[in-house]
Amino acid sequence: VIVAVSLLPVDDDLANKRAQFAPIMKEYSWKCVYAASDEEFTSLWNEMVEKCKAFGYDDVTNFYLGEIQNKLDAIAQGK
């Protein structure tokens, strides 16, 4: 079963939060790819998570998870 999900646009606050942490995710993701050791990877990962959360990552994620759940509920109810 393939389900197409169309999410509502986010408000300016969430868009600004995403704009702040997105470059951090991009930068640190590549740093993690090229980490020389598991320890370096873990350190970079933890630093990325901490920085992203400081810029509102959880707020944005929770918004999208809520939207996805609303869509899934609507599909289950045949709407």
Image: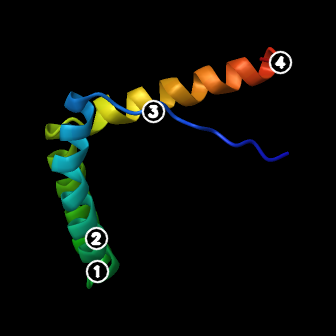
Element assignment for label 4: loop
Seen from the viewer's position, the closer of residues 20 and 58 is 20
Q: Earlier in the sequence, mark 2 or mark 3?
A: 2
Asked if the residue at tag 4 contacts the one at tag 1, i.e. Cβ–Cβ closer than 8 Å, the answer is no
The circle drawn on residue 78 is 4
Is residue 21 positioned above or below 78 on the image?
below
Q: Is residue 63 above or below residue 35?
A: above
Cα gap from disc 4 to disc 3, whole angstroms:
21 Å
> In this figure, which residue is indicated by the disc labeled 3?
64
Residue 39 spot, x, y in % from top left: 25, 71
Q: In the rendered structure, which amino acid carries the disc numbered 2? A: Phe
Callout in the foreground (1, 4):
4
Q: Quadrant of residue 11?
A: top left
Residue beneath disc 1: 37
Estimate the spatial distance between the alpha carbons at disc 2 and disc 4, rounded to whole Å. 44 Å
For label 3, the SS is helix
- Asked whether the residues under the numbered discs 2 and 1 touch, taking CB atoms below 8 Å apart as contact, a structural biologist would say yes
List x then y, in percent, for residue 23.
20, 60
- Quarter of the figure with residue 56: top left
**Secondary structure beneath disc 1?**
loop
Please give the label number shown on residue 41. Answer: 2
In screen coordinates, is 52 left or right of 59?
left
